[in-house]
Image: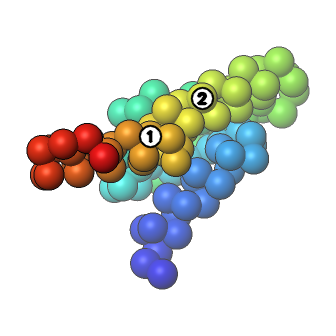
Amino acid sequence: MHDKKRICYAFLEAVYFKKPLLVNRYSIFVRDIEPKGFDLVVMDGFLTKKEVRKVRELIESEQRRETMVSHNYEVAKKHYSYEFLRRRLNFLLTNFFGTEL
């Protein structure tokens, strides 16, 4: 499997299992995932005191973790679920064949 796809799947798997995330911004993330509005700690190649402070907050605050993972789960459900895929595929097929399937 392509490494970039593997990274994307790992991201979605972490969201599905409701794990807080620290993400080093990579091309697919910047282009396809970041605009969706996930609540994440992000870094650009190296950790700064700001990211360390945010990670520490996640470790120490159960409420902050729960807020993050619940929000991310809902965002992923909206953009990456089978329900979304079904609606999108139905839209594409309807436009192609001219009738709803």
Query: Is residue 7 depicted above or below 72 in this figure?
Result: below
Q: Position of residue 56 (x, y in %)?
A: 78, 32
Mark 1 falls on what kind of element? helix
Query: Is residue 57 depicted above or below 100 in this figure?
Result: above
Q: Which mark is residue 25?
A: none
| Dot 2 or dot 1, earlier in sequence | 2
Q: Quadrant of residue 64?
A: top right
Query: Is residue 42 depicted above or below 28 in this figure?
Result: above
The kind of residue on which mark 2 rests is: Glu
- Residue found 13% across the figure and 52% down from its top: 96
Mark 2 falls on what kind of element? helix
Q: Position of residue 18 (x, y in %)?
A: 74, 40
Q: Quadrant of residue 48?
A: top right
Q: Is any part of residue 13 visible from this angle?
A: yes
Q: Is any part of residue 38 visible from this angle?
A: no
- Residue 92 versus residue 73: which sits nearer the camera? 92
- Residue 17 versus residue 44: which sits nearer the camera? 17
- Residue found 63% across the figure and 25% down from its top: 71
Pair 2/1: label in front: 1
Q: Residue furthest bottom?
A: 1
Q: Position of residue 84 (x, y in %)?
A: 44, 40
The kind of residue on which mark 1 rests is: Phe
Tell me how far mark 2 sits from mark 1, CA to CA: 12 Å
Q: Residue beneath label 2, please?
A: 74
Q: Residue beneath label 1, please?
A: 84
